[in-house]
Image (cartoon, grey):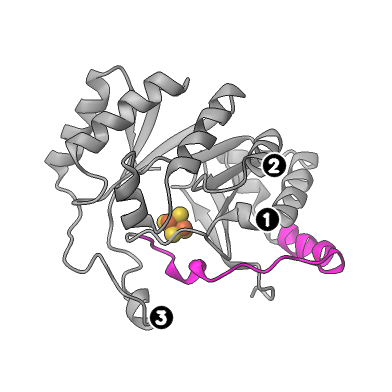
């Protein structure tokens, strides 16, 4: 059982958060409030570790991570830092990334990209693979459905591309929000004009986690919205493929 206020959950044997079998650490705190968020409990503000606490917390977490070394080795997996937004707690994240690299444990960072560019680029040097969400190009829609501007997310993606960072792009397919032909078309144009990335993972909406909204007394924006049909998911896949993108569904 975890006893720190910085990571609110550890999920073992995860197969959707990067390659192979992974242990996923969910960091507390996120600056966004996406309508479709599965982890609304993470949206509370994060705490920063002080120097004294840091070594103890990092050592505890490494112990948890190393418990499943055998699964990582056999499956080509590793550890994924997710959330919430792990980059809200850069000191703890960097410490863990350094420790994992020393032990040759493969690392993924699951990020919204809504962060200071210096922190993001430093993380890119320390991590093996970044899972980066691209949600909406239209600024008004980004504000409406995530609570914040999308400019930073898009600018940061350009910076990562300039550094040729190893990225797996992910597109959450959310009916009535991100799932419009216009948004999909604009995402393709943005990626082609501004980045080196030509592969994308489509993440269709799923309804897991919705009960949390009631429990936390938070507004559930997804109550009347159903996951996209299989046909629609395939249609979106074809739209990307017809413009030369490699597409996977999930992960
Ligand atoms: S960025 Fe991720 S964790 Fe943050 S609110 Fe959006 S879906 Fe939730």
Kindly check if marks 2 and 1 are in contact, taking CB atoms under 8 A apart as contact.
yes
- Kindly report the distance in space between the C-alpha atoms of the residues bearing marks 2 and 1: 9 Å
SS for dot 2: loop
Q: Is residue 192 above or below residue 110?
A: above
Q: Which residues are magenta?
A: 37-63
Q: Splitting the image into 4 quarters, where does residue 122 fall? A: top right
Dot 2 alpha-carbon crowd within 10 angstroms: few under 14, some 14 to 19, many 20 or more: some
> In the image, what residue occupies the spot 18% across and 51% down?
176
Residue 56 on the magenta segment: yes
Q: Is residue 194 magenta?
A: no
Closer to the N terminus: mark 3 or mark 1? 1
Q: Quadrant of the N terminus?
A: bottom right
Residue at the spot x=69%, y=52% of the render?
90
Residue for badge 2 = 105
Front position in the image: 105 or 205: 205
Q: Is residue 63 left or right of residue 156?
A: right
Image region (quadrant) for ligand 1: bottom left
According to the picture, the residue beneath numbered tag 3 turns out to be: 216
Question: What's the residue at 27%, 53% (across, down)?
Answer: 205
Q: Mark number for residue 65?
A: 1
Q: Would residue 134 be visible to someone looking at this image? A: yes
Residues packed near mark 3 inside 10 Å, few (<14), some (14 to 19) or many (20 plus):
few
């Amino acid at each position: 059982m975890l006893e720190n206020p910085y990571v609110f959950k550890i999920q073992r044997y995860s197969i959707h958060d990067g390659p192979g079998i992974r242990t996923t650490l969910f960091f507390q705190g996120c600056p966004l409030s996406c309508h479709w968020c599965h982890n609304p409990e993470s949206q509370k503000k994060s705490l920063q570790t002080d120097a004294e606490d840091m070594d103890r917390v990092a050592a505890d977490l490494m112990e948890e991570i190393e418990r499943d070394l055998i699964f990582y080795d056999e499956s080509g997996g590793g550890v994924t830092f997710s959330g919430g937004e792990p980059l809200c707690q850069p000191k703890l994240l960097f410490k863990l990334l350094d420790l994992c690299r020393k032990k040759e444990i493969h690392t993924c960072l699951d990020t919204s990209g809504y962060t200071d560019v210096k922190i993001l680029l430093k993380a890119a040097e320390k991590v093996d693979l970044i899972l980066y969400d691209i949600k909406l190009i239209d600024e008004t829609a980004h504000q409406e459905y995530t609570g914040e501007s999308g400019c930073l997310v898009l600018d940061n993606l350009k910076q990562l591309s300039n550094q040729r960072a190893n990225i797996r792009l992910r597109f959450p397919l959310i009916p009535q929000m991100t799932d419009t032909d216009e948004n999909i078309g604009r995402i393709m144009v943005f990626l082609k004009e501004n980045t080196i990335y030509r592969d994308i993972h489509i993440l269709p909406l799923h309804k897991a986690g919705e009960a949390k909204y009631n429990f936390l007394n938070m507004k559930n924006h997804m109550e009347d919205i159903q996951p996209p049909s299989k046909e629609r998911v395939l249609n979106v896949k074809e739209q990307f493929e017809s413009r030369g993108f490699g597409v996977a569904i999930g992960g």
